[in-house]
Image: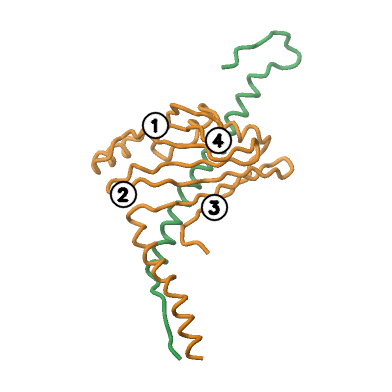
Chain colours: A orange, B green
Amino acid sequence: MTSKPTVRVERKYEGPVDDLWWLWTTKEGFESWWGPEGFRVQVNKLDLRVGGALDYDMIASDPQQIAWMKQNNMPVSHGTHGKFVEIVPMKRLGLSHMIDFIPGVEPYANTMVVEFVPEGKMVKMVVTVEEHSTPEWTQRAIAGFESQLTKVPGILAKRRGTQ
Amino acid sequence: MRLYSLRPEPFRELEAWVASYQQVWDARLTRFGAALEKRRTRKKSAAPPAQEKKEDDSDE
């Protein structure tokens, strides 16, 4: 059992799988979809090998987003550092990101794994993201969660002792 | 026998975080689909029709 929050998303796309792979593993492909709403991405380095870098700038592009960032004293552009941790061409891709842009939160790494599963003419893409650590505003939640779980063995032992 | 209870709040916060993260990813996967479609369309239009003899090597 893990107390780390994991997010798993999946979606089916029309194949062939090499088009999907291209979107993840090339500068042009990655830039075309990665940026969250209101941001665009500019890839500075993409070295597709295990341990190779994926460095990019995330640049706020939406006026509302820019205003919000400024209001919260956050830079409108941020250099993001990633690393390829697993590469099985057309099948599986592991990416690790340094999350070092949250004010007041120690930098931490988060890892995601993308799997491409052919299903006839379609390809199922499964993304699993696991946080190694969590932003401050969820840390409290995790701490609470963990403290509850650490109590469980004691509770069970006590329970057994009374039986 | 003793009864123990777990406080639900941390679980709810965790759930909320997971849900918001899930939304970010849902939106991202929708953009992925649109980018995939765009690439496919571009590939199709870049490939010269079979009848045409003109060679096109202007692929960027």
Residue A33, position in %: x, y?
50, 35
Judged by depth in the image, the label closer to the viewer, 3 or 2, is: 2
Per the image, label 1 sits on a secondary structure element best described as strand
Residue situated in front as seen by the camera: B58 or A126? A126
**CA separation, marks 3 and 2?**
24 Å
Residue with the mark numbered 1: A57
Residue marked by disc 3 = A8
Mark 1 or 4, nearer chain start: 4
- Mark 2 packing: few (<14 Cα in 10 Å), some, or many (20+)? some
**Residue at point 51%, 32% (across, down):** A52
Task: Judge depth for marks 1 and 4 and give the one in front.
Answer: 4
Which residue position is annotated with label 2? Answer: A105
Between circles 4 and 3, the one closer to the viewer is: 4
Q: Using the rendered image, report if marks 4 and 2 lie on a common chain.
A: yes
Q: Which residue is mark 4?
A: A50
Q: Are marks 1 and 3 in contact (CB under 8 Å)?
A: no
Q: Residue furthest top?
A: B54
> Residue B59, position in %: x, y?
60, 16
Looking at the rendered structure, the kind of residue marked 3 is Arg
